[in-house]
Image (cartoon, rainbow, N blue to C red):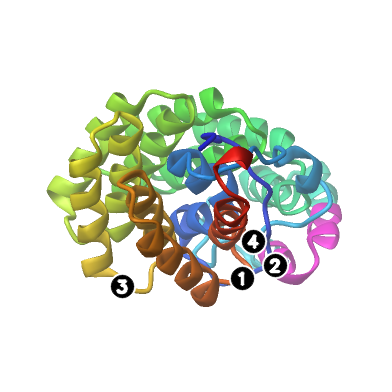
Amino acid sequence: MVPIWRGKRRSARVRGVRRIRTVLLGALAAVLLVALAGTALVLLPGPEAEAAAEPLPLPPDLPRLAAGPQYDECLGLLRNDADGALAFAETWDAAGGGEGAKHCAALALLALGEAEKAGERLETLGRLSRAPSIARAAVYAQAVQAWMLANQSGRAFAAATMGLTIAPGDLDLMLDRAVALGTLGRYQDALEDLDRVLATAPDRAEAWVFRAAALRRLDRVPLAAEAVDRALALAPENAEALLERGIIRQLRGDTRGARADWERTIAIAPDSAAADLAQQNLALNEAGPQRR
């Protein structure tokens, strides 16, 4: 099997997803899950080419850096008209819209696929904002999302670390940083963050999935199998966990079990990055070892 750290991305215009965490497992699954999974039997192209062509989903509970009707209107436009939101935000910013206008403009850029520009703006806003720490940390989480989409894992790690300096107990940011570390090949460091998350929140299925992938990349396959079993005990229909268990089963010579898991992955989440990888693993298994 050829490990991969990059993959193509699929996303709807806007889906109701919870903050960055679900985004990482959805629209960013090919950038992050695929990265941590390191699983497919083939090397996929990077996300950059498709990022500009497809708008990105935005979380429903956006951190609020301002108040007032203009801020509400701009954030509302993000849901269905990212171009309109950007135009509104830029006009508002020119008229002295402050942090609210800058935040909305950065999110509009992210939704439009301008991930690097969005990352720069969100990171700057998180650093300079006068908003409460919890809101600033959430903005740093959005910067992590942007940097990962821009294929800049080092910047994502740095943004997550900066967010954790002002909100050290933010488990979502800690999980974000673990994912960024995984994409950088720093699996042991990723495990340390994941263990901190799970010590506080042992019911986080996605953390168990990432832990399994990191352990597998460290050739600790028995522990990886235990971790993915924990994930599936918590979330039996988790497509990413099924994808990971299939990989572990394949490594252990259980081709039939791996196929069953990958087929289930596709059935549960047919439009996901996990399904893309499962399909390619199935196809290469069918082709035989000479094609792997």
Query: What residue span does the magenta drawing correspond to?
Result: 74-88
What percent of the width, then of the height, locates residue 206?
34, 56
In whole angstroms, how far apart are the C-alphas of marks 2 and 4? 6 Å
Q: Are marks 1 and 4 in contact (CB under 8 Å)?
A: yes
Q: Secondary structure at mark 2?
A: loop
In whole angstroms, how far apart are the C-alphas of marks 2 and 1? 6 Å
Q: Please state which amino acid type lies under the numbered disc 3.
A: Pro
Judged left or right of residue 258, residue 144 is right
Residue at the left extreme of this rendering: 199
Query: Would you call the spot at circle 2 few (<14 residues within 10 Å), some (14-19), or many (20 or more)?
Result: few
Judged left or right of residue 289, residue 73 is right
Q: Is residue 277 above or below residue 272?
A: above
Q: Secondary structure at mark 1?
A: loop
Q: Are marks 2 and 1 in contact (CB under 8 Å)?
A: yes
In whole angstroms, how far apart are the C-alphas of marks 3 and 2? 24 Å
Q: Which residue is mark 3?
A: 236
Q: Secondary structure at mark 3?
A: loop
Query: Would you call the spot at circle 1 few (<14 residues within 10 Å), some (14-19), or many (20 or more)?
Result: some
The mark closer to the camera, 3 or 1, is: 3
In whole angstroms, how far apart are the C-alphas of marks 1 and 4? 5 Å
What percent of the width, then of the height, locates residue 196?
19, 39
Q: Nearer the viewer, residue 73 or 282?
A: 282
Q: Which mark is residue 57?
A: 4
Tell me which secondary structure the magenta stretch mostly adopts. helix
Q: Which residue is mark 1?
A: 15
Q: Which residue is mark 2?
A: 12
What percent of the width, then of the height, locates residue 123?
57, 32
Residue 52 shows in this picture: yes
